[in-house]
Image: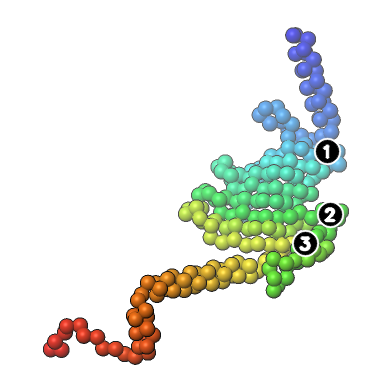
Amino acid sequence: MRCSVSFFILILMIVHSELFAQCKTYQLDAKRDTINCTDFQNHKQGDWITKVTDNHGEPGYREEGVYKDDKKEGAWTRYNLMGDTTADENYKWGCKNGMQRYYNLLGLVREESWKAIDPKNPYDTVRVYDLNTPDKYDLKVVKVEASSVKHGTWTYYDPERQAITKTEEYVIDQLVSNRKKTITELNDSVITAQKNLLDTSAMNKKKPAEVLQYEKKNAKKKIKVRDGATGVP
């Protein structure tokens, strides 16, 4: 048993030694894990925790995540100096990629959707929708100049009421029009009108034929109806 423990400690020492050998500079956190490693090419590598103090009116923050060859990679979290989460971000090739969430002290205020572009292959295949037929589209290969573009659904919240205030849809940095939504609303209006018409027809079917004929005959006439009033003011 004592040999097994000694062997395990030896393995840890070897791993740490190899890791230290890769780092020109590094720090140890409270658990004695290596963080903030800079390699001999001065590239940030591995787990990093960065602290920024208040500066010229800009609030300070702390963020933590992973660097790969001096570029942010994967999930990153940002906190204010009181320890509250202010952002959950995701990165690829050092650029925002996928869902990003931002908070204030009351809760979630915004969700952003981004797409990172491979710097070695700055081309992407996108859907180009037909303006007259929203469900019809062609696939186009386009060159993307930016390193990261808005792509997908953006949602804005009122954290106090915990309600959505606005949504936007982007395709490769281009805001998609609400044409499809407008068509849906129009279809809903048509369905409602048809339903009202059917309800009116059903109501009319319940009336006797004599009443329907009378209403049709006098539809444009002003008919005076006796209500029992004596006419004396």
SS at mark 1 in the image: loop
Three-letter amino acid code at the position of disc 3 = Val
Q: Which residue is mark 2?
A: 119
Q: Are marks 1 and 2 in contact (CB under 8 Å)?
A: no
Please tell me the numbered disc located at residue 126: 3
| Foreground of the two, 32 or 205 | 205
SS at mark 2 in the image: loop
Looking at the rendered image, the disc whose residue lies closer to the viewer, 2 or 3, is: 3
Q: Badge 1, how many Cα within 10 Å: few under 14, some, many 20+?
A: some
* 224 left or right of 210 in image: left
Three-letter amino acid code at the position of disc 2 = Pro
Q: Badge 2, how many Cα within 10 Å: few under 14, some, many 20+?
A: few
* 136 left or right of 223 in image: right
Image location (x, y in percent) of residue 22: 84, 33
Image location (x, y in percent) of residue 77: 65, 44
Query: For the residues marked 2 and 3, what is the alpha-carbon distance in whole angstroms?
Result: 17 Å
SS at mark 3 in the image: strand
147 relative to 134, above or below = above
Total count of labels: 3
Mark 1 or mark 3: whose residue is earlier in sequence: 1
Is any part of residue 58 visible from this angle?
no
Please tell me the numbered disc located at residue 23: none
Image location (x, y in percent) of residue 146: 78, 60
Query: For the residues marked 1 and 3, what is the alpha-carbon distance in whole angstroms?
Result: 38 Å
Mark 2 or mark 3: whose residue is earlier in sequence: 2
Q: Which residue is mark 1?
A: 39
Tell me what residue is drawn at x 71 percent, y 58 percent. Answer: 151
Q: Are marks 2 and 3 in contact (CB under 8 Å)?
A: no
Image location (x, y in percent) of residue 176: 67, 66
Look at the image and tell me in which quarter the N terminus lies. Answer: top right
91 relative to 47, above or below = below
